[in-house]
Image (spheres, helix red, strand yellow):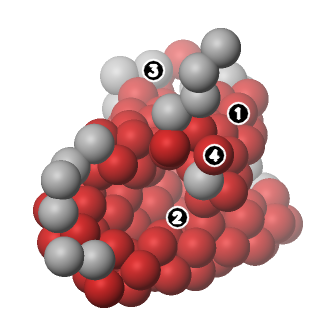
Amino acid sequence: MKQFYFERLDVWQKGRLLVKQVYHTSNTFPTEEKFGITQQIRRACISVNCNIAEGSSRQTGKDQARFTEIAYGSLMEVLNLLILASDLGYISESYVLSARDLIEEIGNKLNALRVTQLKRN
């Protein structure tokens, strides 16, 4: 089976791990949050990987980098929503601290990918 370029990116693989963690954790959120923070955090998390994948299909490095920037923005949205979920008592502060490690790693990889993309013509 052919593997697309984005599937080989470590940052995309780490993003998959974050999606799994967020989905598992958000299952514990209150039912009244089903259409609130639960849906929002899941969509933001998925957006990270979707933008990496979509950006990989663009022809120029500048276009690719724009999608990587959007992925980074979605990643920050995930962190924000995790912090808010902790503030609301849906998850522990220690969970947020552990998730921050993965988010920081993904963020660093996105920044490195963006730098590489901008060097392309």
Position in image of residue 2 (x %, y %): 59, 21
Q: Quadrant of residue 106?
A: bottom right
- Compared across the picture, whether 22 is left or right of 99 comes to left
Q: Secondary structure at mark 1?
A: helix
Mark 2 or mark 3: which comes first in sequence?
A: 3
Say the numbered circle drawn on residue 42.
Answer: none
Vertical order, 87 against 85 (above or below): below
| Callout 2–callout 3 Cβ contact below 8 Å | no
Query: Amino acid type of disc 3?
Result: Lys
Residue at numbered disc 1:
20
- Spatial separation of the CA atoms under disc 1 and disc 4: 18 Å
**Dot 3: within a 10 Å radius of its alpha carbon, few (fewer than 14), some, or many (20 or more) residues?**
few
- Spatial separation of the CA atoms under disc 2 and disc 3: 18 Å
Residue at numbered disc 3:
34
Mark 1 or mark 3: which comes first in sequence?
A: 1
| Callout 1–callout 4 Cβ contact below 8 Å | no
Residue at numbered disc 2:
79
Q: Residue at x 19, y 76 (%)?
A: 121
Q: Residue at x 58, y 39 (%)?
A: 7
